[in-house]
Amino acid sequence: MKALLSSPPALRGQVWQRLLPLLALFVFFGTSFTAQAQPSNPNTRFTGSNIIIDPGTGNVTYDGQNTTAAPDFDGEDLGTFDVSNFNTTLLLNGGSAFTSEFAPDVINSATLTYNVTADGVSAPVTSGTIALPLVNTSGGDKSFFNDIANIDLLRGATANTTLAPGSYTVDVFFTVSGRTTRSNGTPRTFTIQTPPGGAYQATFTVTGVRPTEPPTSTTWTGGQDDNWFDPANWSNGVPNSGKDATIPDFGSGSTIQYPNIYSDAIKLPSTRETVIQNPGGGTSTVTTDVPGYDNTATGPRGASGPAQTRTFTMNGTSQAQRSITRLVVGRLNVFGDFNNQQDSFIQRENTTIAFAGTDQIISGSASGLVNVEISGGGIKDLTTNFTVQAGGVLRFINGILRTNISAVNVSFVELSPATNVNNVGIQSARIEGETDNSYLRGYVKIAEVARAGTTQDFGNIGLSLNFVGNNPGIVTVTRNTAENYTSVNNGSNSRPTIRRIFGVRPADQQTNTGGLNATLTFRYLNNELTNLIPNNQTLDESKLALFVSTSSGNTFGQLGRDALDTESNTLVKTNVTTFATFSLSEFTAPLPVTLTAFDAKRVGKNAEITWETVNELNSRGYELQVSNDGRNYRALTFVPSASPNSNQLLRYRYIDTEAGKTGVRYYRLRQIDLDGTDHYYAPKVVTFDGGAELAKAEVRAFPNPFGEVLTLTANTSVAGPAQLSVTDMTGRVVSQQAVQLTVGINDVSVPNVANLRSGIYLVRLVMPSGEAKVMRVSKQ
């Protein structure tokens, strides 16, 4: 050391520079030079180790403690890495440690520790430890292994940083830990390191400078103007079908311009007026010339074509604090997700936004879109609603637009009604191009004025009405093509509906002036007749008829059909006088009464039985029957028809006040014609007693075992929608429906159980509170 200190200054500097890597190694691995508890048995040891490196071409295994024919890690040059290519990596993926243990030693764990230092710098640039899980034990021999650590040695110590150009050393050592016992029998821990007191060292070189953004992403900077197609406005070039685009929220008061899309168009020069504060008080208006630009074939970059991006993200935290993108002229093709959470996207008239990728997530647009295309195939999931503005078109070319049918208040498509601007009529928004392979699966709605004598197709939603006589006013039409009713449940027909349900609600039913009357045309797709719940049923298209329900799908009445064209997939029914929930199913022999609602519920100690009809032909009335076992019925009362012949909505109600009602009571209707012919309608179930027991159990099934009818009695303190499902013992769903529960005791009929085979089933009811109740029931 004296000789070193007495050496010339230049020589001393050279010596210290040569010692710096050793000093850095000592600093980082200082603990390895301190005394550590060793195993009790000197034969417990490392038997081998290796390091796994991926230089960008796949994993390469290097020997640490030399045991194989693989190249040694120590002294290896791992190569030169140009980080100006964003995708360049040098991955330390882990390694292996092999040990032998001898009693009383037990090895429990192994780690690989690494350290990267730059030449001439003592402090490590980056460091860390990789756990090596135990993967094999054979007697006293153990193997520890990990090849998925994915540590990029070219990255700096902090996020999103990269090593600067230069030469680097990577040091690696292995440590195993275990437990043993002292000579006096007390336990202690021990560690072993390889190489002892040092590290295996390899080198690599870094060239270039890492870009701040990957080649598959670009961010709007507005460095030039508002032209989407000018590369100077983007951090990493103009976005395209393989490059994501992000529009930052620059905050209020920023002078940075947000992008405008003029595809294949010229933006003319303009002026901008700014009001400024004068030094002596008052204000002045300053006019600034704003140059235009040319994105056509004659422009400096040639014809722009449509704007394109992969995932499109417009940042913002609220409506007042958001970014903006305007589609002013032409077309925008989005091939990835569309993130428009704060309604940042503004679309002008006669422009088109196309969702042209495969599977995509679309956040919608509260202020509305104009022309929308669904193309590229796959499924486009709509997370929030969007409105198609008047004059616009939702056009299907290839792909499915899917809404969340369980959240129809936030995930839906709305078609704007026709309007008038400056005395120019603009037609309602429309759906075009739906086929069996490309369509809207879910919920869509429109509300617009309908007038008698004019066929209204409600934006080509799939249902047309031509009213005669009275005007209906504004008619709201909803369409659900994500679900079907499991059964029309009208006493003579238990077949399901097709997977297309229309809700029709005229604002003015004209009940005081003769009511409404219309010819209804119902259009459908072939795929809506197949894979119907329960049991993936298929309906016979040649037997389709129109059904209507005034009880939200609980019971459907058959209206029939006047025409069916299976080539154009249209069904026509004239003289429709009741407007509620419509769907199609297979027809049965016409009944003299079209029953559209039948319900029974407990009201205190009594039962309220209600039913509705929309058509009665030669009907004498209704015998209401009751049973305690679901098999043996007796007459409870007779209710005469309000009119023997009627094509209007008629409502009936009866209160069962019999004393001593206990257990389960089954109510059914026996409809009697003027000539004595009768027809029966499926029973409804009401339970009495068991209130205290039910308050604890919350849900109970009656009867159990069951035959033709199964009813749940549910007690809930929270009102709202509940989900009912029935599965067999293989887990297959055989029936499901949404039900509405009120506070207190509710009786819920389980649909379509008469068709089930004998056996054990699980009935699951998810309460409005979110709590799920599961019951085991048996079909006789």
Image (cartoon, grey):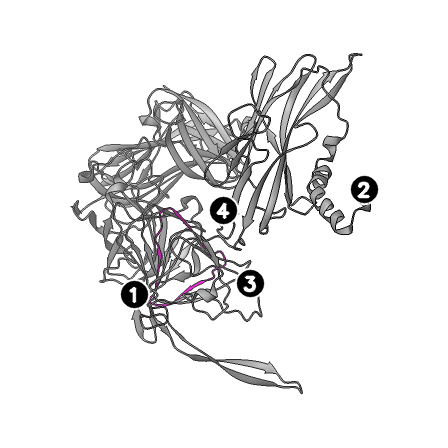
Instruction: Tell me which numbered mark, 2 or 4, is placed earlier along the sequence.
Output: 2
Three-letter code, disc 3: Gln
Question: Visible in this render: residue 236?
Answer: yes
Residue at the spot 54% in from the left edge and 54% down from the top edge: 209
Calculate the distance from the C-alpha at mark 2 to the C-alpha at mark 4.
46 Å
Nearer the camera: disc 2 or disc 4: 2
Residue beneath label 3, please?
Answer: 321
Q: Nearer the viewer, residue 195 or 124?
A: 195
Instruction: Tell me which numbered mark, 2 or 1, is placed earlier along the sequence.
Output: 2
- Direction from residue 607 to residue 104 in the image, left or right: right
Residue beneath label 2, please?
Answer: 3
Q: Nearer the viewer, residue 643 or 50?
A: 50
Instruction: Tell me which numbered mark, 4 or 1, is placed earlier along the sequence.
Output: 4
Instruction: Tell me which numbered mark, 3 or 2, is placed earlier along the sequence.
Output: 2
Residue 624 picture quarter: top left
| Span shown in magenta | 339-361
Mark 4 Cα-neighbour bin, 10 Å: few <14, some 14–19, many ≥20: some
Calculate the distance from the C-alpha at mark 3 to the C-alpha at mark 1.
34 Å
Mark 1 Cα-neighbour bin, 10 Å: few <14, some 14–19, many ≥20: some
Residue 555 picture quarter: top left
- Give the quadrant of the N terminus: top right
Residue at the spot 67% in from the left edge and 47% down from the top edge: 120
Q: Is 48 covered by the magenta stretch?
A: no
Residue beneath label 1, please?
Answer: 427
The local secondary structure at tag 3 comes to: loop
Residue beneath label 4, please?
Answer: 88
Calculate the distance from the C-alpha at mark 4 to the C-alpha at mark 1.
55 Å
Q: Nearer the viewer, residue 542 or 298?
A: 298
Q: In x, y percent, where is residue 407?
A: 44, 46
